[in-house]
Every structure is written in C-alpha cells, then in structure tokens.
Amino acid sequence: MKYLLAILPLLLLLSLISCEPEDELITSSPEALLSFSGDTVLFDTVFVSQGSVTKRLKVFNPNKKAVRISGITLAGAASSPYQLLINGRQSAQVHDMELRGKDSLYILVKVNINPNDASLPFLVADSILFDTNGQRQTVKLVAYGQNAYFHRKEVTGTTTWPNDKPHVLLDTLLVPPGATLTIPKGTHVYAATKAVLLVSGQLLVAGTAEERVTFSGYRREADYRTAPGQWEGIRILAKSADNSIRYTDIYNTLYGLRIGNPGKGGTLVEGCKVAHAFLDGIVGYTSDVKVVNTLIYNCGQYSFGGLGGGHYEVLNSTLVNYENTLPRQTPALVLADYIPGTDIKDQPTSLRLLNTIVYSEGFGFKDEVLLEPGKDAVLEVAHNLLRTEEYKEQLSGNGNLLNVDPKFKKPAKADFSLDTLSPASGAARVLPGITSDLLGKKRDASNPDIGAYERSID
C-alpha cells in the first residue's frame, strides 16, 4: 500500500500530461510550416499622402500540434512604409508567438507612401518574414503608389486641369458662376466617399475616343470596380449653362449626372459611359439635355430620365440592365412633365428618341419605357429597339423594333457591342452630324446600326 501511495503523484502527473490537448502540444518539427491566405498582400493604386485602406493577412497553422513562431518581422523594419498590427499591437516585429494546431490569426497591414516627383505609378515593396522551427517563410507586400492633385472643399476659378497626374476629389469641388472648368483628354479623376462635383459655372470635359476622361471611386481594389455609391456624382446647378461632357466614363456614383438648369443653355453628353450608379445614370430636371453615342448600364433607378418637362434628345445610345445586382424598381427610360413629390407639373416637354436601344435581360421588367409627357408634348420616337408592353401599339412602326433581343456580344462582361445576327444592325436612320460611334469608329453612311456601337465585321 505504501508503494502505491508513493507512486500515486507520479501517476497523476502522467495522467495530466497524457490529457493535454494535442493542439496545445508544441512541435519542433521543421516540416510544421504555416500557410497563408495569399503569398502576396497587394495594394492597388495608393495615392500618396493619403495612406490606404487596411488589408488583412490570415496566418494558419494546418498542423495538428501547436507551433511557436519565433519571429514575425517586417524585412524593412522601422524604415518600412508598411505597418503591422498583430493581436492588437502595432509593431514591426513580434517574437515567440504560439499558434495552436488548426488555429489561425489575422495580421492587419497598412501602407503609407511619401510623395515624390514621379508622375507615373511606382512600386513600393517589402516582405513579412515568418520564422518557425528553423524555417523561414515570406509573404510579399506590394503597393502601387501614385502622386495626384488633391481637391478638398475647393472653389475653383476658370482653369484647365493638368492631366499628367490623377485628380482626387476628397470632398466638394464647386465651379462657381462665371468660371469654367476644363478637364482635358486623358484625365483620370478618383473620388472619395461623399465627394461631389458641383457646377454653377461651365464644365467642359474634353475627352476623345482615343484618350477618354474617367471618373470613378477612390478605391482601386478589384472588388470595388463595379461597386455603386462610392461617391456622389456630377451635379449641374441652376445657374450653369452650355456644358459639354464628351468621351467620358462615369462610374461608381450615387447618381451619375444630375442636371437642373431650367432655361439655360443645354448640356451635351457625347460618347460617354455611365455605369454602376446606385440611383440614376443621367437625369435632367426641366432642362435641355442631348445624349449622343452614350452607353448607360446597370443603374439602380433610371438609366436616363427627363422630369418636370424640358427638352431631351437621346440619339444612337444604349440603355441596358444585364446582371444588375441593384434592386431596381423603375424603368430604364422615363419622360414626364412633372417631378414626383413636388409642385412642378404640366411643364412643356419634348423628346427625340432615335436609333437607341432600351433593353434588359430576364422577366423582371417587361416595360423599360415610361412616357408621361403631357398632352402638348412633342415626341419623335423612331428607329429604336425597345422593351415595352405598355406602348406596343403606340410605338409600333416608324422603324421601331419592339421586344426583340438586341443580341449583344458579351453582355455578362459589359460588352454591349452588337453580335453578327443583331436585329439592330443596319436598322438605324442616318442622322446629320453623327458619323462615328462611342469608340470613334465610322458609322455606315447609308445603313448605320441602332445603339452606341457600330457593329464590327468579325
């Protein structure tokens, strides 16, 4: 009995050791390596002086037993433009961290890039080093930095923006009455949350088919390329007149272009693309708007609207919704002599809708056209391809094609050029002054195509 009492503590200790969970036992095997959510943490274009969004790296221990990570270190140490946040602590290096079997941890990575004199994007690189059981693993850190012109709560005079570097709208930019803002070809404009371009003077956006102007959200990661509502948009105010927006792409807005300048000189929108607006693509309020060779797609409300009367032309354009993830409840094209929710009604209204496609996929919308222009309105609707049940009888004839698939090449990839068998091919009317398409391609002189694109011969 006394022998049993003597070995009882030893048996109890052995029992405790044998009951220790395997995932807490630390292995020293050099084969017990870590795995990562990626071999590279990539920051797409980061505008200098503004920092960037924080990225996450997941570090996983795929082994049954725990490992002791002897070091997690930034290769560039304190001089690195990157910062690490590990278990709530910011440090360029951490030592002797244990990670249980099948467990993981997140490392937050942030980059701050100092300005330099470069106009073109430049590369900023570093690495995170992981040392475990005598083995070293590396995760690369890569950021593309770019200098830019920054605009925050700015009132601009008459000026032409340089286009050697991008322009970043951080807040409100106002073009006041009497001033003209010219944005030349090839300019890239990136806008942060709540940024808005307000025009009380004149806006001249002078893109070309070869060198387009681009407005888009500030976030450059791939997941944000088609995300709507990243910035407010462009708003033409009451005192503004004679605006021209040519060969310009407007993406990721709350609304793309809102025009409310009754009685002022018209706004020309030519050769443009407007997409991924959380609300409307282009809307005019009791205004004069001319849209030519323009593609508007996947907006949350109207693609194009003319409300409260006004004079509108939509010529050789394409207004479509394909694989639109926004909860749309309105038709793509609307014209009305009133503004809903206001006292504005019975306003003089006219519309020229020619050579234009207004369509959508699926069965969610049988009517992509809403026309409530009032009894004295002047309407010319001809040689269009339209999806409509409401106006089948009213709009039949005049060269209109109703409820037939336009047969785009690759609509799922936002390629709305015409396929070989498209019924829109050769079905447009020749319009004076419209001799090329959205891409600058020459239109057929006698039998042009309906829509923003002239069909290519494959």
Image (cartoon, helix red, strand yellow):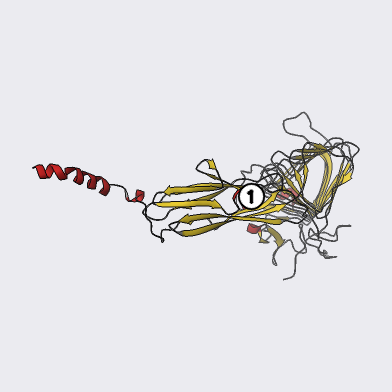
Residue with the most extreme bottom position: 458
- Report x, y in % for residue 454: 77, 63
Bin the neighbour count of mark 1 within 10 Å (Cα to Cα): few under 14, some 14-19, many 20 and up.
few
Q: Please provide percent x and percent y for residue 260.
A: 81, 37
Vertical position of residue 336 compared to residue 251: above or below? above
From the top left corner, tell me how far across and down residue 336 is, in percent.
76, 39
Report the label total. 1
* Whole-percent x, y for residue 93 in the image: 53, 48
Q: Is residue 193 visible?
A: yes
Q: Quadrant of residue 257?
A: top right
- What is the quadrant of the N terminus in the image? top left
Residue type at the position of mark 1: Ser
Q: Is residue 322 visible?
A: no
**Element class at badge 1:** helix
452 sits left or right of 35 in the view: right
Foreground pick, 351 / 209? 209
Can you identify the residue that label 1 sits on?
Answer: 79
Instruction: Tell whether 8 sits left or right of 94.
Output: left
Residue extending furthest toward the right? 178
